[in-house]
Amino acid sequence: MLPILTLALIMTGKYKDVLMLALSIVSPHGANIASGKKTLEVRSWRPQYLPIRDLLIVENSVFLSLDMPIDPYGKAVAIVDIEEIHEWQPNEVVAACSSGWESGYWAWSLSNVRSIENGQFVCAKRKLYEVDFDLSGL
């Protein structure tokens, strides 16, 4: 659920585009997050601060790298909160929708998942990044 003030501003038409923090996820895992199937996101890095609230999940079709840092065809699929991050454990493979476990990674606990139906196209980038997002369609 979006914060009450945000919802009130959207409903009155006084608030449309907002700068949101985003994280890109390779398909089909953005959809897995949106459906609640994937409850952990596994990364080799941690953000500088927690919690992260109202994080926009952008699903894209290619693995982003230094050689290909942007996918212009990402799609917004969910908004989530990240309250906690811990070392990824072998018993968390299913929660991460992963095919296997490897040490040295961080498990980001996804909570307050809000699926976005018919999400708008958003450029996918590496790491955490900011994006202008139109909330009026939510």
Image (cartoon, rainbow, N blue to C red):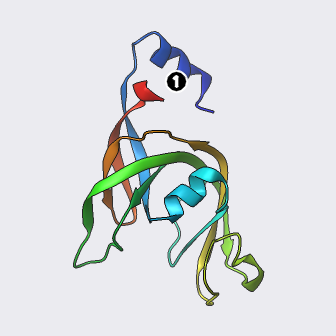
Disc 1 is placed on an element classified as helix
Q: Could you tell me residue 87's position as x and y percent? A: 67, 78
| Res 8 quadrant in image | top right
Q: Is residue 102 above or below residue 73?
A: below
Front-most of residues 32 and 68: 32
Q: Could you tell me residue 25's position as x and y percent? A: 45, 63
Toward the top, the furthest residue is: 12
Work out whether residue 53 can be spotted.
no
**Lateral position of residue 91 relative to residue 133, left or right:** right
Work out whether residue 58 can be spotted.
yes
Q: Count neighbours of disc 1 (C-alpha within 10 A) and say few if under 14, some if 14 to 19, many if 20 or more.
A: some
List the residue tagged with mark 1.
Answer: 6
| Residue kind at label 1, given as amino acid type | Thr
User: Which residue appears at 50% of the width and 74% of the height?
Assistant: 45
| Res 99 quadrant in image | bottom right
Q: Is residue 73 above or below residue 107?
A: above
Front-most of residues 79 and 77: 77
Q: Could you tell me residue 112's position as x and y percent? A: 67, 45
Toward the bottom, the furthest residue is: 102
User: Which residue appears at 52% of the width and 46% of the height?
Assistant: 78
User: Which residue appears at 26% of the width and 78% of the height?
Assistant: 66
Q: Could you tell me residue 1's position as x and y percent? A: 63, 33
